[in-house]
Structures are given as C-alpha cells and as structure tokens.
Image: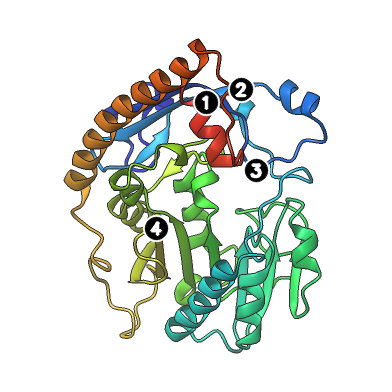
Amino acid sequence: MDVDMMCPVCGANEKERLLTVERAPVSCGTLFPSMEAAARAGECRLEITVCTGCGHIWNDAHSPTQAVQYDENYYSSFAASTQGRGYQMGLAHDLDRWVRVSGKTVLEIGCGDGFFLNELSSLGARAIGFEPSSTFEVAAARPGIEVLHRYFDFDEPLSDGTTVDVVVMRHVLEHLSQPGPTMRSLAAGALGPPDSRFLYIEVPNALQLLKDSLYFDFYSDHIQYFSPGSLNHLLRAAGWLPLAQIGNREEFLGLVCVNAESRSREHPASNGPGLLGVRDTVIQAANGFRQQFDGWRKQLATTVTGFKEKGSRVAVWGAGARGVSLLTSLG
C-alpha cells in the first residue's frame, strides 16, 4: 500500500475525491517583490480528499517540493482588525480560566504578529514565541514577550532548558504534512516533564467550511482540513486528552488538552467535549458540497464566458487569497 495515499490522521486508505483544482496558486500568503517573480513561482494542483474512515480532509496532491516557505516573504497578521483583536483577547481569558497561565511558561508555535501571546503575557505568563515569517517583526516589537525568528524544532528541547507548561498552536497544524508525528513529539518529554503540560490547539473547522459551501477556502497553504472527529482522533492517538472546546465554535476548532500521562483527579479521561461520532455528518456534508461546487462552477464559468463573448470586460474586486482561489477554480 502506498503510504502517501493513506489518510494522515487514521492511516486508512478509504477515500473519495472532494474537488480538484488544476492551477492553484502556490501560496496565498507570500508577498512577491514583483509581478514577474509571482509569475515565476508557478502553480500547483489541489486534490482535496475526504477519508471515509475518520472524516478527515486533506490535499492529496501536496508535494514537499511545492511546500509553502514561511520565510521573510510570507506575511500574515490579524492585529489590524478590531474583530480579530477582540476575538483573541476573549480567547486568552477563556484559556486562562482552564490553565491559569499566571506564573506558567507559555510557548506559542507560529505566534504570528504576537498579539495573542502578548495577551497571555498580560495575564502573568512568561510568553515565548517562534515565528519564521516576516510577521516576526511585528511580534518582536511587542513588550513582555520573547520571540525567536525561526522554525520551532519539535524534537528538541529549548536551548536554555526551559520547561514549558502550556503549548499553543493556533492555525499551524493545518499547514503541516505530518500532523501525527508532530503532536506525538509535543506530548513527549522534550519540553520538560509532560505529566502536567497543557495544549491549546486551534484550526479551521472543515465541517463548517463544507456546510457553508466555502469553495474558496481550499488553497495550497492549507494541507490538512480537520473536522471535529478527525482532530479528536489525531490528538488522542498522539497522547493528548481534550478537556474543553473554546473560541469560535463554528468557524474554528479550539481545544484545550492535557497530556495523557496526567492522572490527576482534575483531568479525568473522557470522550472529549462532544467531538466524537461526527464522521457520517462530515461525509454527508462533503457529498452535498461536491454537488453544489460542480453546479456553482459551471454557472459562474457560463456567466463569465457570456460576458467575454459579448466583448465585455470583467473586473474582480478583492484579489487576496480567497479571490485568487475562486478565480483559479474556474480554470
């Protein structure tokens, strides 16, 4: 059996194609220095696939040679948004109610512009972040947090031997080609004694994406698309016990977890915060999404072709990640 064809969450080889985009942009977050440089970057193929075993969704055409580089040319920041700041401030307080960050060391992997990490620092945490992209410059200017401008090494302890109490990964896991080994490494002892370590992980909710027919939310920057059941399956297999779901429960999956080696009465094993048993719901939503997408694409392509045949010009307002993704889905 070809390992590359197996589900990256449950390992099953039972899958169905959800949608295919032949000429997708190689990255929706990279800022190229010129139009010529952007054109030279080329294009990639998306084969969005759903596992009928666990309900996980991923880009089956992802290739390491086309992996997005989160370097000095990549930029993603939400701190300029009033809504984005308000959400992160509320989320920091929700997380604090579960893990009590005051006096604890919090490590955020992929801290972006550092706003969320700064909020945790204001609640009394020692806040350490890793950010390899150019967004590091925004984070590094914030007082009260320590930010390192590089990728985080999941297999090595921190260079100064710091023991980490809380690991935060917000909108990182969906960018990784091997999410299982990554989460197992975090559950191990590289960051200090694991028996009391907490994890907060947040990813886009693929189930809501399907239900809302967000065709344009599939692009190469995201390799994995987690449903509630598949995220729960991945975490438990990697040694994490989900305790609670916080944050935006529709758009995002945000889970507070504790290391499975913890045996304290405060964190008894459970079936998780209502996230099991949703595989059939995902499969049903995927089938509906596929049918709607095919019909929508034909209708939009017919409309655009009609304008072209009449000699009209079509102007597209908003050529960001979703706009470009929408256009490329038309071929």
Give the mark nearer the N terminus: 2 vs 1: 2
> Which residue matches tag 1?
328
> Which residue matches tag 4?
251
Give the mark nearer the N terminus: 3 vs 4: 3
Q: The disc labelled 3 sits on which kind of residue?
A: Gly
Q: The disc labelled 4 sits on which kind of residue?
A: Glu
Calculate the distance from the C-alpha at mark 3 to the C-alpha at mark 4: 20 Å
Callout 1–callout 4 Cβ contact below 8 Å: no
Calculate the distance from the C-alpha at mark 4 to the C-alpha at mark 2: 28 Å
> Which residue matches tag 2?
43
**Would you identify the image quadrant in which residue 220 lies?**
top right
Name above or below for residue 331 compared with residue 152. above
Mark 1 or mark 3, whichever is nearer to me? 1
Q: In the rendered view, does 178 fall on the left or right side of 279?
A: right
Calculate the distance from the C-alpha at mark 2 to the C-alpha at mark 3: 14 Å
Mark 1 or mark 4, whichever is nearer to me? 1
